[in-house]
Amino acid sequence: MKFRKLATLLLAAAVLSAGCNAGDTAGFIKGTYSLENVEGQGAAQQKVYRAAGQTVPAVAKEIAAEQQPQEMSKEDENSMFLVYSNHVVHVQKDPDNAEDALVELNTHEYVRQHYDPSFLNGFLAASVISSLFGSGWRSRPHGGYYGYGRYRYERRYGTAPGGGYRTPTAPRGGYTSPSPGFRAPRSGGGRGRVIRR
């Protein structure tokens, strides 16, 4: 009898533990990829990880397999988005090292404060963008941010990868190119804490 009770308790603990770990996208990203940079804090935070030697589609599928996103952009070699209830994952090719992918784990508030909604319009459905930015997002001021890899590259070289100020090719059109006066994220951009490996 005691053995049966012990077995039942152990089984219940195992199920509870599995339930806690299942679908933990943030935990999966933290445990799988190396931390590169931290920007912001609290409700408006971004953490950037490096997926060394992996392509954007492969990393996006790996994360989606851990927890099904509410929406996932179409497969693209340069940039893909996965939208969850409390964060947005942006997987992008590293402009400085095309062999690696960068994984941004952004809170919704970070996306609202920094990303250009018209850029996201090239990847995500209008209804999803409206849920992130609100119904009047087209007329509201917003950050001119297009991803950590691109921002870091432009700070270093003054141009987007390949020359000129242009957005990466998106699977669906509809966004506008940034102006030559590319703006840093309003929370400070370059003041992010860079993690040295």
Image (cartoon, helix red, strand yellow):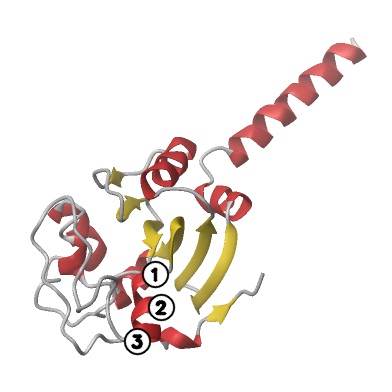
Residue named by callout 1: 149
Q: Please rate how many residues cluster around mark 2, counting C-alpha atoms within 10 Å: few if below 14, some from 14 to 19, many from 20.
A: some
Q: Amino acid at mark 3?
A: Arg
User: Which residue was labeled with disc 3?
Assistant: 186
**196 left or right, relative to 23:** right
Which image quadrant: the C terminus? bottom right
Q: CA distance from mark 2 to mark 1?
A: 5 Å
Decide if residue 185 is in sight here: no
Task: Please provide percent x and percent y for residue 104.
Answer: 44, 62
- Mark 3 vs mark 2, foreground winner is 2
Give the mark nearer the N terminus: 3 vs 2: 2
Which badge, 3 or 1, is on the more N-terminal residue? 1
Query: Closer to the camera, 14 or 82?
Result: 82
Determine whether label 3 and label 1 are within 8 Å by CB.
no
Name which residue type carries label 1. Answer: Gly
Residue 32 vertical position relative to residue 147 in the rendered view, above or below: above
The residue that label 2 is drawn on is: 152
Q: Residues within 10 Å of mark 1 (few under 14, many from 20)?
A: many
Name the residue furthest top: 1
Please give the name of the residue rendered at 21% of the width and 90% of the height, measured from the top-left corner: 181
Mark 2 vs 1: CB contact within 8 A: yes
Relative height, residue 7 to residue 107 (above, below): above
Label 1 sits on a secondary structure element that is helix
From mark 3 to mark 1, how far is it between C-alphas? 17 Å
Q: Whole-percent x and y of residue 70? A: 31, 44
Mark 3 falls on what kind of element?
loop
